Image (spheres, rainbow, N blue to C red):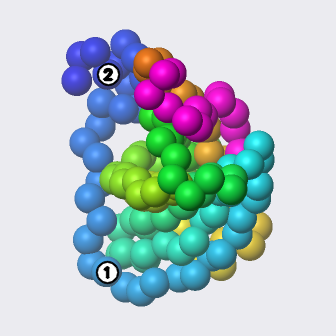
């Protein structure tokens, strides 16, 4: 926790909120394409104390199989919402990440923007076919 304060500020020192009291699924279905990468906010799960937002990323290239590079992802909605990555997984040409958002988002998110910051991790590029570039994507 001490190093977290140095790297991310005091706001990261607070204990993370765990979603509790599942209420419903809310479809969002928004997407954007940036540099052959499709980013989509597919849906969220509403809980009594938080929301969990799901973002999918898919490489839009002709090759049947690719090796994606690794990156860190951060979600920003507005200063009133805290977002932290909850989980992530990958498959073939895509990956899915979930973010816990507190306080809970409204059911109607039409006026909100989802800004995903992508920061590639330094790796050995000879093992990757598709590398992420540092960017911020607004969905």
- First along the sequence among labels 2 and 1: 2
Residue 51 place in picture, x, y as percent: 44, 67
Residue 22 place in picture, x, y as percent: 31, 80
Residue bounds of the magenta highlight: 125-139
Q: Is 38 situated left or right of 66 in this image?
A: right
Viewport quadrant of the N terminus: top left
Viewer-closest of 127 and 80: 127
Residue 110 place in picture, x, y as percent: 74, 73
Viewer-closest of 120 and 138: 120
Q: Please report the residue visible at 63 percent of the width from the left and 63 percent of the height from the top.
A: 40
Q: Please report the residue visible at 46 percent of the width from the left and 57 percent of the height from the top.
A: 92
Res. 4 mark: 2
Viewer-closest of 66 and 31: 66
SS for callout 1 = strand
Say above or below: 6 vs 65: above
SS for callout 2 = helix
Task: Give residue 42's quadrant in the image.
Answer: bottom right
Viewer-closest of 22 and 126: 126
Q: Is 122 situated left or right of 58 in this image?
A: left
Disc 2: CA contacts within 10 A as few (<14), some (14-19) or many (>=20) = few
Residue 103 seen in the figure:
no
Task: Give residue 29's quadrant in the image.
Answer: bottom right
Q: Residue furthest bottom?
A: 24
Q: Is 82 situated left or right of 78 in this image?
A: left
Q: Is residue 133 magenta?
A: yes
Residue 31 place in picture, x, y as percent: 71, 64
Q: Which residue is mark 1?
A: 22
């Amino acid at each position: 926790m001490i190093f977290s304060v140095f790297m991310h500020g005091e706001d990261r020192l607070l204990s993370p909120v765990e979603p509790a009291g599942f209420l419903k699924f809310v479809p969002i279905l928004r997407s954007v394409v940036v540099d052959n990468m499709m980013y989509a906010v597919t849906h969220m799960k509403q809980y009594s104390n938080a929301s969990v937002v799901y973002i999918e990323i898919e490489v839009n290239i002709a090759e049947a199989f690719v090796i994606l590079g690794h990156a860190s992802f951060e979600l920003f909605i507005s200063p009133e919402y805290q977002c932290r990555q909850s989980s992530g997984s990958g498959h073939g040409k895509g990956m899915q990440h979930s973010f816990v958002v507190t306080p809970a988002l409204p059911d109607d998110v039409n006026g909100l923007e989802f800004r995903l910051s992508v920061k590639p991790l330094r790796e050995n590029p000879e093992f990757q076919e598709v590398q992420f570039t540092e960017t911020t994507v607004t969905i």
